[in-house]
Image (cartoon, rainbow, N blue to C red):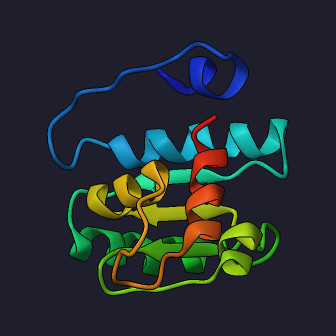
Amino acid sequence: QLFHILYHTDTPVLLGAPTGSGKTTVAELALLRMKKQNPKAKCVYIAPLKSLARERLKEWSKRLGAPPLKWKVLELSGDTSHDSRALNNSDVLICTPEKWDLISRGWRGVSGGFDSSSASIGKRFVR
């Protein structure tokens, strides 16, 4: 029911559904549309827990990182640290809410490897 809206229009969608009902698949359709419209765009996917972020990283690295897409998928959680080049070169960022909050607000002095340049990258994502 959502395919046409997600893949062929710019209509915003708010989806609330039970666990296991396909919310991630719906997000993947929106991601494919976004990258079709703007190949240089970056997707930020917020996973509520580090374990779910890691699970999504493993799955999407296999599916989205393989040919023909060859997208770079990056996890940002309390257990990871990446430089600004890695953030710039990524296509999909998988974040925990806490880590995304730190990046998007541009906090300084945060343990985990973020510096002012990666904070500014985070601000560009939320424009």
**Residue 71 shows in the view:** no
Q: Which of 16 and 22 is in front in this view?
A: 16
Up/down of 120 relative to 52, above or below: above
Up/down of 35 relative to 82, above or below: above
Q: Nearer the viewer, residue 121 or 45?
A: 121
Q: Which residue is drawn at 59% across and 13% down?
A: 11
Up/down of 25 relative to 26, above or below: below
Pinpoint residue 13: horizontal percent, then vertical percent: 45, 20
Q: Which of 106 and 101 is in front in this view?
A: 106
How many numbered discs sit on the rendered protein? 0
Rendered-image quadrant of the C terminus: top right
Q: Which residue is drawn at 54% across and 75% down?
A: 115
Pinpoint residue 73: horizontal percent, then vertical percent: 60, 72
Query: For this view, does 2 lie left or right of residue 7?
Result: left
Instruction: List the single residue furthest toward the left.
Output: 18
Q: Nearer the viewer, residue 75 or 70?
A: 75
**Residue 29 shows in the view:** yes
Pinpoint residue 38: horizontal percent, then vertical percent: 83, 41
Query: For this view, does 77 lie left or right of residue 35?
Result: left
Q: Residue at x 37, y 59 (%)?
A: 102
Q: Which residue is drawn at 16% across and 46% down?
A: 19
Q: Quadrant of residue 10?
A: top right
